[in-house]
Image (cartoon, rainbow, N blue to C red):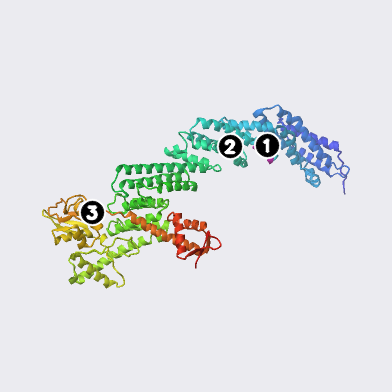
Amino acid sequence: MTQNRRIIPLEEGWARMEAGIDILKRVLADEPGVFFKSEQYMSLYTTIYDMCTQKKPDDYSEQLYERYRGALDEYITSTVLPSLREKHGEFLLRELVLRWKNHKVMVRWLTRFFHYLDRYFISRQSLTPLKEFGHDSFLTLVFEELKATVTTILIAMIDHDREGQIIDRPLVKNVLDIYIELKSELYEKDFEDAFVQGTIDYYSKKAQTWIVEDTCPEYMLKAEECLQKEKERVTHYLRSSTEPRLMEAAQAELLARHIDQILKKENSGCKVLLCDEKVEDLSRMFRLFSRIKDGLPPVSKTFQEHVNEVGMSMLKQAVDAATSKKSEKKDVVTGLELDYVRKVLDLHDKYMAYVISCFQNHTLFHKALKEAFEVVCNKDVAGCTSAELFASYCDSILRKGGSEKLSDEAIEENLDKVVKLLTYISDKDLFIEFHRKKLGRRLLFDKSGNDEQERSLLSKLKQYFGGQFTSKMEGMLNDVALAKDNQSKYEGFISNNPELYPSVDLSVQVLTTGYWPTYKSSEMNLPSEMVKCVEVFKQFYQSITKHRKMNWIYSLGNCNIVGKFDANPIELIVTTYQGALLLLFNEAERLSFSEIVTQLNLSEDDTVRVLHSLSCAKYKILNKDPSGRTISPKDVFEFNHKFTDKMRRIKVQLPPSDEKKKVIDDVNKDRRFAIDAALVRIMKSRKIMTHQNLVAECVEQLSRMFKPDIKMIKRRIEDLITREYLERDKDSANSYRYLA
């Protein structure tokens, strides 16, 4: 059975709704004892339902939608706006937060009352949903009128916060939440834009004052604190999306606009901080300027300039000290130069520590340090190249009895430091050759402190520069190890053939020609005592190998002989040249210069050096007639029977010969070969190349070991054309073609 439902007229139904809305207003006004009962809520909901489901023309859905809008607008204009208009400053913000909270409650309740209308009529007609309309109503009638004032108040409160005053941060956050809840674009356009501009204005004024009044460290400390507090403000009451714009604006005003003034601040800028070793301030500088675009290059440039200035000052001190000493031994590495190398190593350690700790291992600062040391490390000191200085320093720590008294760990650490600095010098091949020369002397004269340390250095060099530059030196070490085995075999050979015993103990080191530096060789006439030794060793060596030719290098030999002086016999440690010359006086009391040259078959230069060491130096074993400090071809010599010394065993030093020129000549010769090989290798792969491209690629390939001279490359190209490896291209005079 169907029961006819009573039609609810529009005015009657709306009167019920107005009564319900009035109760809702009283609830929002916090009237005591006023609240909604469940039956009241159901009555209002049912009223709307009935009025929306009545058949036409009694379906009042459209009229109810309009009256819902009118009721909200009336509440805002009669209650909300008057209460807001009478408030100012922070009180206005508090009232706004309260009214927005109440408005949301009203919209929520009304949406529940009008739920059926919202669900069916509004969705079918594609009208604005009730909740959204409720927010739009507040936005249109309230917020559009007040937003400029509210934004100004907020920015003023945040500026007070920046000044250290206590503000109601939750209130600020609640107000900003209104922007977002009403419409996210409001926050960005109406608040964020104005807030960022306010930040720019605030920090622009602060920076102008601080940059004048404060030192560089004080300014940076204030800037860092400000930036940190801005980040904290984001977490307290700003939207996270604001942070990038906010930080960019603050950093631009505090840092980017004043970067030169900060770095070059008189008596406290970046260079002063470096001089005073202000690690904490330098770390802060890096942190700050790494935040801004192109902020680090000026810092790294200043760092590079400072390191360069300190290095060049150190270099000047070393040059001045060497000059003031006025050493007669020009172009010879002395303790002063080695002290300079130690200082350079310490300087590099110091500023590498800055790069790692203060500048967080940033590649820009590694590059700055590298470029600064490339300038310093490629300067000569008192006629000595850096290549020679580093080789001499390595020699001093690897040689027995060297000037450096270091533990094994310290030696290893120092070798690491040297190899790192070698990457900065352009003439790495020159270092390799100097080092090979000094290694040869350490090995041949048993002056090497430790084979493991020698091999360790070669391993480090191999890692940095490649095996082709260390293979010869590795061969030298292997030769010395084999020489010890050969000596044991030789001694066994003598004991098995006692009739061959030469009556003089002999120790021989057999070297592979290709590995070792070239040494001076001469067909010297050996004394009979030495001749038998050589012949016996030749016989032994032929017994173990028949396919190798031996070439004796007497200039590197040494021997022990006994001088029978009137007072006491003294054992003399001399070179083979010196020993052979002294043994001549077993057969004659007096010998002229020319007789000595003839009997020994030595060059005059070598004879002069040997005679000078025996008659004009510390130990005058021979008497010279006429006496004097120089040797001339007219001099006559005789054995000094009256020579005495408190020592029973003395070493007679031979004046060192200048080997630097030979090393440089050898390196230049190797460079010519290297340039030829590079040019041929490039042209073989490219077939045709312009002159400019060929030179550029050649320089690039060779720069790992040395800086090729452009003129030398041009000469080598001409030589290769002459030797028909290349020819000029017929179509282009500025190009070359490879001849297969």
Q: Is residue 671 visible?
A: yes
What secondary structure prevails in the magenta region?
helix
Q: Which mark is residue 653?
A: 3
In this view, the residue in front, 58 or 42, is 58
Sequence-first disc among 3 and 1:
1
Which range is magenta? 184-193
Q: Is residue 189 magenta?
A: yes
Q: CA distance from mark 3 to mark 1?
A: 92 Å
Q: How many marks?
A: 3
Q: Relative to 156, does residue 555 appear above or below in the rendering?
A: below
Are the residues at dot 3 and dot 1 in contact (C-beta closer than 8 Å)? no
Q: Relative to 509, does residue 380 appear above or below in the rendering?
A: above
- Give the amino acid at mark 3: Gln
Residue drawn at the location 32% of the way across and 49% of the way down: 331
Q: CA distance from mark 3 to mark 2?
A: 80 Å
- Give the amino acid at mark 1: Asp
User: Which percent across, then down, holds residue 193?
Assistant: 65, 37
Q: CA distance from mark 1 to mark 2?
A: 19 Å
Are the residues at dot 1 and dot 2 in contact (C-beta closer than 8 Å)? no
Observer-side mark, 3 or 1, equals 3
User: Which percent across, then down, holds residue 371?
Assistant: 45, 47
Residue drawn at the location 49% of the way across and 64% of the way down: 726
Sequence-first disc among 1 and 2:
1
Mark 1: give few (<14), some (14-19) or many (20+) Cα within 10 Å.
some
Mark 3: give few (<14), some (14-19) or many (20+) Cα within 10 Å.
some
Mark 2: give few (<14), some (14-19) or many (20+) Cα within 10 Å.
some
Q: Which mark is residue 233?
A: 2
- What residue does disc 1 label? 190
In this view, the residue in front, 318 or 628, is 628
The residue positioned farthest toward the top in the image shown: 86
Q: Is residue 436 magenta?
A: no
Observer-side mark, 1 or 2, equals 1
